[in-house]
Amino acid sequence: MENIKVLIADDNFVARRGLRSYFREQEGIVVVGEASNGSEAVEFVRNKAVDIVLMDLRMPNKNGIEATAEIVKIKPEVKVLVLTVVGDKMILIRALIAGAKGYLVYGRFTPEELLENIYRLASGEDSIESPMAPDVLSQIKDNIDRSHSIREASNIEPLSDREAEILSLIAIGKSNKEIADILNIKEKTVKNYISNIYSKLQIKSRYEAISYLLNVPCDGNV
């Protein structure tokens, strides 16, 4: 198995070097770079091979939520694991909406748990280990039913049953390919449905679609 390529994005120099030093001792993980702000993280991922981004949330230029949204847009195969001191539930939801696949709060996880999360993400699993995660995931799933009420809104063209179903799958983080597999349709067909959803909801991205569904602001502020 090839080494897992990790980018550390954190404006705290000590935190970055501490993580780099720790990973130097771990088998199967190589730190390929560091970023001190969100813009640097996006540019690094755009130009280099990265498997996992360890993303702080509060950074200058571009915060971690904004950077995560851009990264998953330009390279969907890259997995973002948020490492932060922020423990706010709504910020966790925004990070998940932006495309983060994992979320760990400093002081609430061990080095071994960090490694486990990285290995899990690299193997293709989601890795949401925050103590708030069950509540957040429950809220996301509960709000999926809102896709039906969305169709009844007077200010937009109603979504079809299939479009509402696809929007629901988007809301729990499924990729186009995963949606195609679940619904037994072609990935190109999924893309066409998503394009129709965007047009009807008058939005431009997955981020906005999920924000609309969950009634969560998508301004990226942390």
Image (cartoon, rainbow, N blue to C red):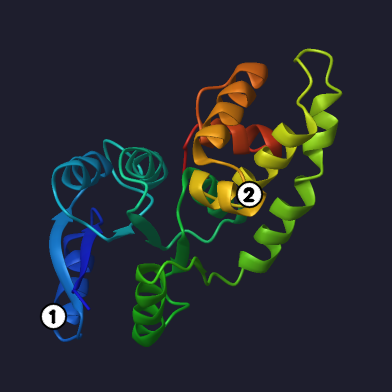
Regarding mark 1 in the picture, which secondary structure is present there? helix
Is 115 left, or right, of 88 in this rendering?
Answer: left
Regarding mark 2 in the picture, which secondary structure is present there? loop
The mark that comes first in sequence, 2 or 1, is: 1
Q: Residues within 10 Å of mark 2 (few under 14, many from 20)?
A: few
From the viewer's side, name the closer residue of 129 and 164: 164
Please state which amino acid type lies under the numbered disc 1.
Arg
Locate residue 173, reporting x and y percent. Answer: 56, 51
Q: State the quadrant of the N terminus.
A: bottom left
Task: Read off the residue under disc 2.
Answer: 184
Q: Could you tell me if residue 173 is visible in this image?
A: no
Q: Which numbered dot is residue 61?
A: none
From the viewer's side, name the closer residue of 43 and 76: 76
User: On the image, which quarter does residue 8 sit in?
Assistant: bottom left
Locate residue 142, reporting x and y percent. Answer: 79, 52
From the viewer's side, name the closer residue of 185 and 72: 185
Q: Could you tell me if residue 35 is visible in this image?
A: yes
The residue located at (78%, 12%) in the rendering is 155
User: On the image, which quarter does residue 159 sit in?
Assistant: top right
Task: Read off the residue under disc 1.
Answer: 24
Please state which amino acid type lies under the numbered disc 2.
Asn
The residue located at (77%, 36%) in the rendering is 147
Is 63 left, or right, of 144 in this rendering?
Answer: left
Q: Work out whether 188 lies above or below 175.
A: above
How far apart in space, not on screen, are marks 2 and 1 (Cα)?
43 Å
